[in-house]
Amino acid sequence: GVGLIDDGALAETIVRTQFERKGLGRAAIVNELRRKHIDQSTIDAALEHLGDDDEMRRAVQLAERRAGQLMGLDHNTAVRRLSGYLQRKGYASDTVRQAVREALPKRSSGVSFS
């Protein structure tokens, strides 16, 4: 109220650090900003700098990095775990599906019938 804290600058800093360092998606970042009592118009302004392409690119990076840890699992289990990981990071379901599809290409079961 007296200008000691610039909510806009704080919101932009939080968006940048949470996205770049922690890999959080929009939903998680919005929750963090609301927890800090930042008003919705300031949140919207801070998120304008975060493009859909940036968010998709970051989700794919996280998915590819995490996919290496899931290689010993069957495809369905790996998809389920990777999807849950990205959802907990705050990514939208369509972003999660596309990132998982890119990080975990469909593998064969190893069973062949001749």
Image (cartoon, rainbow, N blue to C red):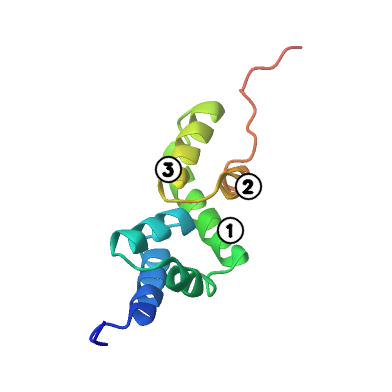
Q: Is residue 24 above or below residue 7?
A: above
Q: Residue at x 23, y 86 (%)?
A: 4
Q: Which residue is mark 2?
A: 98
In primary-sequence order, the first of circles 3 and 1 is 1
Q: Which residue is mark 3?
A: 85
Dot 3: within a 10 Å radius of its alpha carbon, few (fewer than 14), some, or many (20 or more) residues?
A: some
Find the residue positioned furthest to the bottom: 3
Q: Position of residue 81 (x, y in %)?
A: 45, 35
Q: Position of residue 12 (x, y in %)?
A: 40, 76
Q: Residue at x 59, y 50 (%)?
A: 95
Tag of residue 16: none
What is the secondary structure assignment of the residue under circle 3? helix
Q: Position of residue 17 (x, y in %)?
A: 36, 70
Dot 1: within a 10 Å radius of its alpha carbon, few (fewer than 14), some, or many (20 or more) residues?
A: some
The front one of 92 and 1 is 1
In primary-sequence order, the first of circles 2 and 1 is 1
The front one of 20 and 63 is 20
Gap in Å between the C-alphas at discs 3 and 2?
14 Å
The kind of residue tagged 1 is Met
The front one of 9 and 106 is 9
Q: Which residue is mark 1?
A: 56
- The reply, left or right, for residue 32 in relation to residue 41 is left
Q: Give yes or no for contact between labels 3 and 1 (Cβ–Cβ under 8 Å).
A: no
The kind of residue tagged 3 is Tyr
Q: Give yes or no for contact between labels 2 and 1 (Cβ–Cβ under 8 Å).
A: yes
Is residue 93 among the parts visible in the rendering? yes
What is the secondary structure assignment of the residue under circle 1? helix
Gap in Å between the C-alphas at discs 3 and 1?
15 Å
Q: Image quadrant for the N terminus?
A: bottom left
